[in-house]
Amino acid sequence: MDKGPANMPDAETLAHLRSRKDFLKMAGAAGLGAALGSNIMLRQAFALDPTGPTDPSFRFSITSSYHPFDVVSDNFVEHSDDFTSQASYPVLAPAPEQQNGSVSTGGGALSVSSASPFFALFQTNEAPLAPYASVIVDFGSFIGSATNEDTVYAGLIKDASNYVVAWYNNATKRVGIDAVVGGTVNRLVQRDADLVATAAKRFAFVLNSKEVTALYDTGRSEGPTGSTWKPAANFPNPPEVSGDPAITPGLSQYVDLRDPAVLAQYKYGFGVRGDGGTITLDGVEAGYWGRAGVRDPHVVTWADGTPYIKDNKLYLTLTNAGLDFFATAHWGVYTLNLSNYTSPDALEEVGKIFFERGGKVFGDHAGHIVYDDAAKTFLIGVSTWGDFSYQGVQVNYTRFAGDVLHGVHVLRDATKLPLPTPLRNPAIDPSYPSTWDPHFTRIGQRWYVAYVESPSQGGANWDHHPALARGGARSGLSSLTLVGRDAPLNQTEGMVMQRVGGTWYVLCVSGDGERGGLPKKYRIYDLSMVFLGYLNADFTSNIPHPMVTPLPLGEDTKWIMLTFDGTDFYGWNPDGTPILDYGTHGKFYVMDGPTWDGYHEFPPRVP
């Protein structure tokens, strides 16, 4: 090997140098330019000509993993009351009792008392903008001697004749879900459950699109995620009972809360019902559903690929897992505090984005947000999983001129991205072509879009592979042409484009069931979609997306990788059936990669 000038360090000495500063001391009078110009090993080691992602030294190892779970997202609490002071709620008296009893609040409790049967529903003043909502009630005391009704309720309430609620009846030791429409009670599901015996402290209603779940909190770590919450009942029931939840009408056959005009009439609420006596509650909290796990990490970027960092926090999007199949999930915007990025406390949800199309609001997800500084707008691309029913998925996109990264947004003007995916035979397979997992980057004057292309979905026929499209010079996204695809693959997704050492690459992942016995690994392509090799990174489970990103660290670049796995929120029954259907998964992983001294992959930018 060419060692350069005679007074430069040899390979053995180089291996023990710990920093660029050490190198500069050793280089001395030889001249830095001459040394680096003549020695490839030195150029790579000191990152002035950094290694590419196929180099073995470009290595990512797991440094932390945790399973985010929240019934109500911390920053999206719409109503909270611990009843320490008197509060006035609209009180409804539904049939058949039509008597709400005597209500008092204060001193840390809300109590309802009556010598005769009573039924009281309480409305808050707040309503969700999207059908992804939760209500938690804290148990106080039950009547205890009731024979039929000793019940607490949590849910969404329009009036005394129209409400959707989860309930627990301490008299019958049952948990259930009701949809009451025009005074007709539709009992959707009920299950045996003695929550008092299990020392449950809280009971929750969760709405995810057209599905409702009842949860209870034992205060003890339960299930594979370590959450204290356990599922008690859900509708539609798991697939072995009700069929595939993706194609069942669910709650929408009674009342479709995906319709924004309908949902606007329903407010967060709670209630109690008894044969006679007193029931007390210790608190109530309501707001937007949090997550049963997270997946599909995608760093928010500037158009040129620079990570979007503000106040030392990296912005990214994650799919917030719901309590059933894909349509129960929704899209969250998060920040990762770079001061302690391996800690669970570093990950904070700051925004939620929903999409209205066809007159309904959906939790579409698995996409990418780009700040386009030329247009001074956010470019938003998303996959239409929010109503997935084996009739195909597409990438929609829109632009937003305001701050889409914070708060709750329902976007109403997203349209289909004209990706160059050919139509085969719609008479044979009307779902084709499907596309998802978009990633956008503007390189020079052209937009590039990496995405998944899928001939079929469902059962054993899931078939999806990586593809790359490119726009014309200065033509934006309106005239995309195909660069290439790896069509022989059938279990590959998680598209990411990343610049490494000044060169752009396409990253994706192959999971279980890949054709030809190909390994479960992160794949690397160039911008012509020529396969180069595999990323040297720990593989988790499921189909973990390789979200590699460079972080400016002083004068250096720190590489990290964010991904997820297939850990379910609560797991499986002893007979092998799911407690909840596939889709409740997502443990979050942070992997550390190399630090390149004296080099910025992207110079820091201030939003």
Image: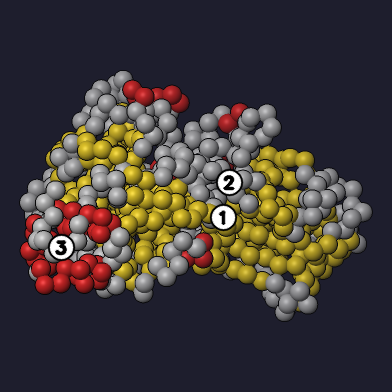
Instruction: Write the residue at 75% across / 67% down.
Output: 282
Q: Which mark is drawn over residue 8?
A: 3
Q: Position of residue 519 (x, y in %)?
A: 37, 31
Under mark 2, the amino acid is: Phe
Instruction: Write the residue at 79% across / 50% down.
Output: 198
Residue ranking furthest to the bottom:
85
Q: Are marks 2 and 1 in contact (CB under 8 Å)?
A: yes
Say which of 485 and 18 sits in front: 18
Say which of 333 and 601 sits in front: 601
Q: Which label's residue is closer to the chain start, 3 or 1?
A: 3
Q: Position of residue 255 (x, y in %)?
A: 55, 46
Task: Tell me if mark 1 has few (under 14), some (14-19) or many (20+) residues whose alpha carbon lies within 10 angstroms of its own.
Answer: many
Q: In the rendered image of this protein, does residue 331 appear above or below residue 326?
A: below
Name which quarter of the figure residue 380 lies in.
bottom left
Query: What is the spatial separation of the Cα atoms under label 3 and label 1, in whole angstroms?
Result: 54 Å
Q: Which label's residue is closer to the chain start, 3 or 2?
A: 3
Q: Which residue is mark 2?
A: 569
